[in-house]
């Protein structure tokens, strides 16, 4: 028995060290320590179990006993500790027993403490909250990544769970290689104003991403103590105060409210300038009554010989096509939304010119050739994009919200902080949320998405007023105004903020697709809008577009499940990617006159005709030179992605697909701007500013995006090695800055698409080239 004399206001802890030279597992030496409030026992050799039931034996064991704290009634106290040693061995076993008082058992604020630990010699220390501190961050660092260790924060309860097999039973814990950080809130987690910090070394490193050494493979008992000792340094620092939360929220909202103010100023200046420059165009009085200015496009004048190039006779596949007669057209005042009317041919010219096979295969196309359908029905067709994306958003977001709430609940209940890949050095909790800053930083997507909807709504209202007044410039000049895709883009931007916030509730490998799903849709909608600008009659319908997005998201889910190591998945995906690129290229090259439904072998016949006509018959120059250059470059880029995926098989499959979308969008946007400038069109100050702002903000955003702060491609312990402190207001980290800047960059990108062709508002549509 041992007697412990404790002074008033001093927390004493005792450490018991035992050592036995016996390796006989049948007759271990049993040690039982009895205290006033608890019993602690272990055996020597101490056995730990690893992966595949491997066992590791330790002859040296050192344990810290549950500390005693004198009561306020007495200034000092004596405590008796009984240590019982027993063995069932029929022979004598030598052992060594050493009991010592710990001098540095209580950790101090802002003071680093160094120590060592091993699997059989864990350590734990006491921390008490100072009077003016409500929240602290426990920072633990080590120079060596291995051996793998676990940091746990536990309440003042005896016994303390300080062995590998029970450290996860109580409190909050993280696995660790070189760095760990745990934020502890006094009122929420430990109302008793004190807690234990426990350090456990694991017998194997696989939990931290390490491999089991080949020398210990197999079910062999090994003594491996000295090689598993790890030096650690722990520092407990106060966390941020509540005032920082308030400042961060004000900063987030005011920063993006400034965009609202800027938009109001621009709208006011535009209103003043328009009001001052408002003049009646010549001839508008005589045409105002009819509301439509008919422009003639004689095929014989604008189409060279062989203008039916590419118009394969479809009678063998579809049984021929009947031209619509004027009697079959809908009434002028009809406002129905029939799908039959949406897809029907609106023939407003003589019979020969009403055949889309001839008009759309002209060498030199103008916008009037591809804006022949009834405006009201086409506008309704594009509004389906808006209503469909709202439906998709609701049905997609609700299960996501429910799932991430479940994730967060599991983290809070189990204390397992290896479930979520936060930047723990800058993870500020609020309520049940573990990283409120990562969620708050997504407010920009929602605010700027709503602002973009307001801007589009303003343009839509002005356009409707002009149409009601039968303004000639609205009817026959400039790009036809259809706002359905713009509304869908605004909703997609808002939903990206919502789903990114949901992902950051508990970021991990399984739910990363939540963060990227609407990124695919944003990129796809931008490409569709860019194509719709000069091809309003032949753009994809909302149903086919969203069905394509559904296929992409399905492939992303399959990539998460099978894309890690399964070669067959990458082969199938690459084949789908290449074939989809060829099919889309054929569709674009022939201005929508290729349809798989009309002839199942049509894609191959078209491809053969392109090769024969453009590469053999007239090798010097393809019939559609600009389109051919774009499609060649686009296919090379997409085939390169397919080859890269086959060779390297990136684990982050969602980002891989997103890269494909973004590269195609940038390629098409660059082609569009170059062709616009080649056609002697100009860029007005507002779109030019938006283009420059987009480039600058995207460059800054991507810089912060590539500042990797965590990675679910690695183990949680390895991911924490990348954690960094906050860089903005002591509240936001690099990834939060990426959220802010990417929201602004997407907003400016949308404004580019919205204002890019404003210079054409006074140009007749039969003078606007199609490319």
Image: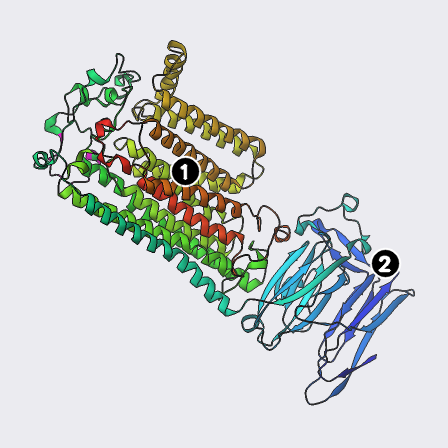
Residue 82 pos. (x, y %):
80, 77
Q: Is residue 290 left or right of residue 591?
A: left
Q: Which residues are the magenta region?
A: 329-341
Residue 502, by quadrant, is: bottom left
Tag 1 and tag 2, C-beta contact below 8 Å: no
Q: Is residue 540 visible?
A: no
Q: Is residue 328 left or right of residue 191?
A: left
Residue 359, by quadrant, is: top left
Residue 307 pos. (x, y %):
26, 15
Would you say the magenta stretch is mainly helix, strand or loop? loop
Residue 616, by quadrant, is: top left
At mark 2, the secondary structure is: loop
Going from the N terminus, do you reach mark 1 or mark 2 first? Answer: 2
Residue that mark 2 sits on: 24
Viewer-nearest of labels 1 and 2?
Answer: 1
- For the residue pair 240 and 269, the one nearer the viewer reads as 269
Would you place residue 386 above or below residue 254 in this image? Answer: above
Residue 491 is inside the magenta segment? no
Residue that mark 1 sits on: 551
Residue 264 pos. (x, y %):
30, 53
Q: Quadrant location of the C terminus? A: top left
């Amino acid at each position: 028995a041992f007697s412990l004399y404790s002074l008033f206001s001093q927390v004493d802890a005792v450490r018991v060290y035992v050592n036995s030279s016996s390796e006989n597992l049948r007759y271990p030496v049993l040690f039982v320590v009895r205290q006033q409030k608890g019993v602690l026992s272990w055996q020597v050799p101490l056995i730990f179990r690893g992966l595949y039931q491997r066992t590791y034996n330790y002859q040296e064991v050192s344990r810290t006993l549950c500390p005693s704290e004198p009561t306020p009634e007495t200034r000092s106290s004596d405590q008796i500790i009984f240590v019982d040693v027993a063995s069932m061995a029929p022979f004598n076993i030598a052992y060594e027993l050493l009991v010592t008082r710990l001098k540095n058992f209580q950790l101090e604020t802002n003071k680093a403490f160094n120590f060592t630990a091993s699997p059989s010699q864990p350590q734990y220390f006491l921390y008490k909250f100072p009077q003016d501190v409500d929240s602290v961050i426990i920072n633990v660092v080590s120079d060596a990544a291995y051996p793998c260790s676990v940091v746990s924060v536990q309440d003042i309860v005896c016994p303390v769970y300080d062995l590998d097999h029970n450290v996860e039973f109580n409190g909050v814990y993280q696995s660790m290689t070189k760095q760990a950080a745990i934020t502890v809130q006094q009122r929420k987690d430990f109302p008793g104003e004190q807690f234990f910090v426990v350090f456990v070394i694991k017998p194997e490193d696989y939990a931290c991403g390490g491999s089991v050494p080949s020398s210990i493979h197999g079910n062999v008992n090994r003594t491996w103590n000295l090689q598993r000792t790890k030096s650690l340094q722990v520092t407990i620092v106060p966390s941020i105060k509540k005032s920082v939360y308030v400042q961060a929220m004000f900063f987030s909202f005011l920063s993006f409210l400034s965009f609202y103010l800027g938009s109001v100023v621009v709208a006011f200046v535009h209103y003043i300038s328009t009001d001052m420059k408002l003049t009646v165009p010549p001839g508008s009085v005589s045409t105002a009554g009819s509301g439509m200015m008919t422009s003639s496009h004689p095929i014989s004048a604008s189409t060279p010989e062989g203008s039916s190039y590419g118009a394969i006779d479809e009678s063998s596949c579809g049984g021929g096509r009947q031209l619509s007669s004027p009697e079959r057209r809908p009434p002028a005042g009809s406002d129905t939304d029939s799908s039959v009317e949406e897809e029907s041919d609106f023939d407003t010219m003589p019979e020969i010119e009403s055949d889309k096979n001839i008009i759309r295969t002209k060498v030199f196309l103008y916008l009037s050739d591809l804006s022949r359908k009834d405006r009201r029905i086409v506008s309704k067709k594009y509004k389906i994009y808006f209503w469909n994306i709202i439906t998709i958003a609701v049905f997609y977001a609700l299960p996501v919200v429910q799932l991430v709430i479940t994730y967060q609940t599991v983290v809070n209940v189990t204390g397992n902080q290896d479930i979520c890949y936060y930047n723990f050095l800058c993870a500020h909790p609020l309520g049940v949320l573990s990283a409120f800053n990562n969620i708050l930083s997504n407010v920009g997507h929602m605010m700027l998405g709503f602002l973009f909807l307001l801007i589009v709504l303003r343009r839509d209202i002005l356009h409707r007023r002009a149409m009601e007044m039968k303004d000639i410039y609205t009817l026959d000049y400039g790009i036809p105004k259809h706002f359905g895709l713009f509304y869908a883009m605004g909703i997609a931007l808002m939903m990206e903020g919502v789903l990114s916030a949901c992902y950051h509730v508990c970021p991990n490998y399984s739910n990363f697709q939540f963060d990227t799903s609407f990124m695919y849709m944003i990129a796809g909608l931008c490409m569709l809008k860019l194509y719709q600008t000069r091809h309003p009659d032949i753009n994809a319908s909302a149903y086919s577009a969203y069905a394509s997005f559904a296929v992409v998201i399905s492939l992303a889910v399959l990539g998460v499940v099978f894309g890690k190591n399964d070669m067959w998945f990458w082969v199938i995906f690459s084949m789908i990617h290449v074939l989809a690129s060829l099919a889309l290229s054929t569709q674009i090259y022939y201005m929508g006159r290729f349809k798989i439904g009309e002839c199942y072998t049509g894609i191959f016949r078209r491809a053969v005709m392109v090769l024969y006509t453009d590469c053999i018959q007239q090798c010097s120059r393809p019939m559609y030179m600009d389109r051919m250059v774009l499609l060649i470059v686009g296919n090379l880029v997409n085939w390169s992605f397919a080859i890269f995926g086959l060779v390297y098989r990136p684990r982050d499959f969602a980002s891989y697909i997103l890269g494909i979308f973004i590269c195609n969008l940038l390629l098409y946007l660059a082609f569009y701007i170059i062709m616009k400038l080649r056609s002697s069109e100009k860029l007005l100050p507002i779109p030019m500013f938006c283009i420059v702002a987009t480039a600058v903000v995207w460059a800054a955003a991507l810089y912060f995006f590539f500042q990797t702060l965590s990675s679910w491609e690695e183990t949680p312990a390895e991911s924490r090695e990348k954690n960094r402190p906050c860089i903005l207001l002591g509240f936001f980290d690099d990834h939060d800055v990426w959220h802010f800047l990417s929201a602004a960059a997407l907003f400016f990108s949308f404004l580019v698409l919205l204002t890019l062709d404003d210079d054409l508002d006074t140009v007749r549509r039969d003078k606007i080239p199609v490319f």
